[in-house]
Image (cartoon, rainbow, N blue to C red):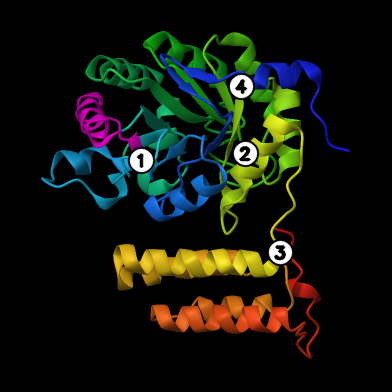
Amino acid sequence: MLSLSPTLQARLSQPLKIGSFEVKSRVLQSPLSGVTDLVFRRLVRRYAPESMMYTEMVNATGLHYVKELPIIMEVDPNERPISIQLFDCRPDFLAEAAIKAVAEGADTVDINMGCPVNKITKNGGGSSLLRQPEIAEAIVREVVKAVDVPVTVKTRIGWNDQEITILDFAKRMEDAGAKMITVHGRTRAQGYNGNARWEWIARVKEVLSIPVIGNGDIFSVEAAVRCLEETGADGVMCSRGTLGYPFLVGEVDHFLKTGELLPAPNAIQRLECAREHLYALWEYKGDRGVRQARKHMTWYAKGFMGAAELRGQLSLVETVQQGLDLIDRAMEKLAAGYEPEEDAQADLVVV
């Protein structure tokens, strides 16, 4: 039976203090490019109303040259707590972008120093800053001077196995004025392969006085509890575990606060959420929202008979009505106990 140690439970019952800002949940929704828009965050927040949400990462250079803020920076005035994540390698542009983020309603400003994608790192952003700690320090110092909200950092443990520099790097970020650091327990070279090395998160926690958030391989309540127990981290950040499963942050948060495991939503309930997600994206972004919804729909379509076929169909939808009809028919079949003639074992994927 899953349970929290008394020491951990006592520590996690207190609000998470990020500088002068308090958050009533120790479970955070990670910023995810192309995912954590206003629509997705609303779904996650339904089940985790007190958790910190993050926007998709915003390019500070791009922001410098446009007159209107990009849609990914839009936040609902009622969606608190909220952080806007920025990326770049130019301290002055990031400071300017941070001012705009605060004006938009950000409770904290997060600097991405962990993204492993080539198009980000080749321009000096994301995890490439692990190799340029002096620039990373300058970025944090400039952003801290520019805004009156806490500045935080999200990063990885190093560039590769030969360059695991997180202990020195994290201390530099704290000394520069960062009020919290989230550590994804993989190197840049790993991408999302292999296991997250939580032992490095534990080592970071030992050398810092600011909150340390554990990230990487948090796909379940059980994984979140193990990460907290093994690392001593001040909280966990859920990332890929929420793709097609916006319930996860709330499930973890509920367990940490009550010791109770919530029943997992069944296939029909997940498809109902998929239907709502699709329709909301269409309302918010029009046909572009429908195209963006394809990947979300395929993530929801797991763990039930006929899911593989449904995924293939949903990945090709051109209109919102097509998507709604496909989901409705799938729910009707599930409600009727439908089982396709072909072997469906391949569809029994654990979310």
* Residue 316 can be seen in this image: no
Circles 1 and 4: CB distance less than 8 Å?
A: no
- Location of residue 318 in the rendering, given as x and y in whole percent from the top left corner: 39, 81
Mark toward the viewer: 3 or 4: 3
- Above or below, 20 against 61 in this view is above
* Residue at the image point whose x is 59% and y is 9% from the top: 207
Which three-letter amino acid code belongs to the residue tagged 1?
Answer: Asn
Secondary structure beneath dot 3 equals loop
Count neighbours of disc 2 (C-alpha within 10 A) and say few if under 14, some if 14 to 19, many if 20 or more: many
- Location of residue 86 in the rendering, given as x and y in whole percent from the top left corner: 33, 35
| Residue 266 numbered tag | 3
User: Which span of residues is magenta-colored?
Assistant: 85-105
According to the picture, the residue beneath numbered tag 4 turns out to be: 234
Q: CA distance from mark 2 to mark 1?
A: 29 Å
Q: CA distance from mark 2 to mark 4?
A: 15 Å
Q: CA distance from mark 3 to mark 2?
A: 25 Å
Image position of 179 (left or right of 144): right
According to the picture, the residue beneath numbered tag 1 turns out to be: 78
Q: How many marks?
A: 4
* Magenta residue check for 86: yes
Front residue of 165 and 351 = 351
Q: Quadrant of residue 48?
A: top right
Q: CA distance from mark 3 to mark 4?
A: 31 Å
Mark toward the viewer: 2 or 1: 1
Return the disc, 3 or 2, that comes first in the chain's sequence: 2
The quadrant of the rendering that contains the C terminus is bottom right
| Residue 216 numbered tag | 2
- Location of residue 134 in the rendering, given as x and y in whole percent from the top left corner: 36, 17
- Above or below, 170 against 209 in this view is below
* Residue 154 can be seen in this image: yes
Mark toward the viewer: 2 or 4: 4
Q: CA distance from mark 1 to mark 4?
A: 26 Å
